[in-house]
Each structure stands twice: as C-alpha cells, then as structure tokens.
Image (cartoon, helix red, strand yellow):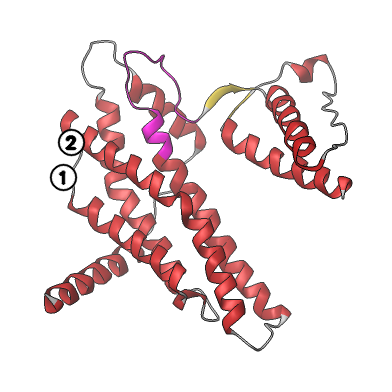
C-alpha cells in the first residue's frame, strides 16, 4: 500500500509539473461573454454545441491553471510553502488536476454535465483557501524567531499577490461556466458577466449594505454619498462582472467607514 501511494503521489507530482510548464490561453471578457450567450442558446432544443466546445476547452485549460497555482504554493518563500495548512492546499490543487485529467472530454451532454458537477465541487472546496494561507502565515510567524526584513516581506507579499490574482481568474473561469449552465427555468444570460452592468446601481446597493453592516457592528457609520456626475452618467452601463465590482467597492467603503468610526 505504501509503495502504491508513493507511486501515485509521484505520478501526480509529475503531471502537475508537466502541466504547470504549459502556457495558459489568454481570454478576454468580451469573448467569454459571447461564448456564454452562444453556449446558452437552445433555439432548436438541442444541447448547445458552443457550450460543449467551451467545456472541452476548459477541460484542457483548467488543469494547466490549477497546476500553476499548486506550483506557486510549492515555491512560496521563507518556509511558508512547508507549513501544514499551505501544504494541505497544495495537495487539494494537485488532487483537482488528477480528477479533471481523469474525466473524459466533455464533448457529449452527459460528459459535460458530469464535468460541470465536478467544477461545482471544486468551487465549494476552494472557498477555504485564503483561510488556509492565513493560518500558514500565522504558523510561519510563530515558528520563526528572526524578524523578516522589509525586503523579505515585500517578496512574500509579491508572491501571495501573484497567487491570489491568478486564483481570481481561475475561480472566474470555473464559476462562469457553471453560471452558464442551460436551465429551462432560467433566461439566457452571460453567466457572471452582465452586458448592462450599472456602476451607479451597484455602488448604491453596496453603499447601503456597508452602512448597515458597519452600523450593526460598531453602532455608527458615516454617511456614504454615491454621486453621478450628470444625468447621462446615471444611465451609463458597461459589460462587466457585477460580483467583482461589488467586492471591490465593498472592501474600499468598508475599510474607509471602519477607519472613520475608529
């Protein structure tokens, strides 16, 4: 059993290393939106051919990107890569590579649905990655007696920034495909992308939410004024990802309001 596990781990590591050396395919927001629309189209009651093409592409693309995230975790500096929590996350990513690589190409309706269900499980599992990395940082701080220099901290911060930035793209590809799943009860959409995303409407909604959360937590909150430059600006829309816009604006406003209250 030990020899079998050793061989399995060795094969998995070799696969991850091979895939991590591949170059990911660059994608534009516009193309992802167009693929989502055409992939959701079901005018002839036939399973959308474009969706199958999208799934086949992701089946080939995601293992490369996931393997690269695992490689980045393995190379985190100053002992962070060796902490228990970070090694656990690395193993999760390696397992995803093995699972996706073992699935048949999603070029049929049945295989595509199986592939999409696998992605759903991955999205749920990956929700604790930031927490695990944070635990690794705490463990690193406790284990090291010497103080990391500003240069060392900058290098560590740069490595983590690169990892999490790439992780956002990975999650987006995965969740976007899931959100585009055909459903008789759902209208055709662009997945996570809204062709008529209103920055003003999104900011107003986020401001109201932040005021409520900060007031509940701290007993007070400064007023947040969301101002459109003119009537034309109030009606402007753009093709964007509303969830990303809400997160960015929410973080900025929450930090500003908490700092003001304190």
Q: Is any atom of residue 68 visible in this view?
A: yes
Q: Residues within 10 Å of mark 1 (few under 14, many from 20)?
A: some
Q: Residue at x 75, y 27 (%)?
A: 208
Question: Where does label 1 land, which residue?
Answer: 104
Which secondary structure class fits the magenta region best?
A: loop
- The answer to whether residue 25 is left or right of residue 43 is right
Query: Which percent across, then down, holds residue 212?
Result: 75, 31
Rendered position, 46 above or below 81: above
Residue appearing at x 54%, y 25% in the figure = 194
Q: Which residue is mark 2?
A: 111
Give the residue at x 37% y 33%: 178
The front one of 246 and 129 is 129
**Who comes first in sequence, dot 2 or dot 1?**
1
Helix, strand or loop at mark 2? helix
Please provide the residue range marked out in magenta: 175-192
Q: Is residue 189 magenta?
A: yes
Is 144 situated above or below 262? below
Which residue is pictured at 22% across the width and 34% down the height? 112
Question: Looking at the picture, does residue 27 appear above or below residue 233?
Answer: below
Quadrant in the picture for residue 108: top left
Q: How far apart are labels 2 and 1 at the CA level?
A: 7 Å
């Amino acid at each position: 059993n030990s020899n079998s596990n050793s061989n399995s781990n060795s094969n998995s590591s070799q696969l991850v290393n091979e895939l991590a050396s591949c170059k990911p395919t660059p994608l534009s927001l516009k193309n992802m939106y167009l693929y989502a629309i055409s992939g959701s189209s079901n005018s002839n009651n036939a399973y959308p051919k474009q969706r199958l093409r999208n799934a086949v592409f992701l089946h080939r693309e995601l293992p490369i990107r996931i393997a690269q995230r695992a490689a980045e975790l393995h190379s985190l500096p100053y002992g962070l890569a060796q902490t228990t929590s970070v090694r656990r996350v690395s193993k999760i990513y390696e397992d995803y590579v093995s699972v996706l690589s073992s699935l048949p190409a999603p070029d049929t309706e049945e295989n595509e649905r199986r592939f999409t269900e696998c992605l759903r499980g991955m999205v749920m599992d990956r929700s604790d990655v930031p927490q695990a990395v944070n635990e690794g940082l705490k463990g690193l701080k406790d284990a090291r007696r010497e103080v990391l220099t500003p240069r060392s901290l900058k290098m560590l911060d740069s490595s983590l920034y690169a990892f999490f930035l790439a992780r956002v793209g990975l999650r987006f590809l995965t969740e976007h495909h899931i959100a585009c799943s055909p459903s008789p009860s759902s209208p055709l959409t662009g997945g996570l992308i809204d062709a008529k995303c209103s920055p003003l409407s999104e900011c107003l909604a986020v401001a109201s939410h932040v005021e409520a959360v900060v007031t509940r937590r701290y007993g007070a909150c400064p007023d947040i004024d969301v101002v459109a430059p003119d009537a034309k600006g109030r009606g402007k829309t753009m093709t964007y990802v509303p969830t990303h816009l809400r997160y960015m604006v929410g973080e900025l406003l929450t930090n500003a309001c908490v700092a003001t209250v304190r």
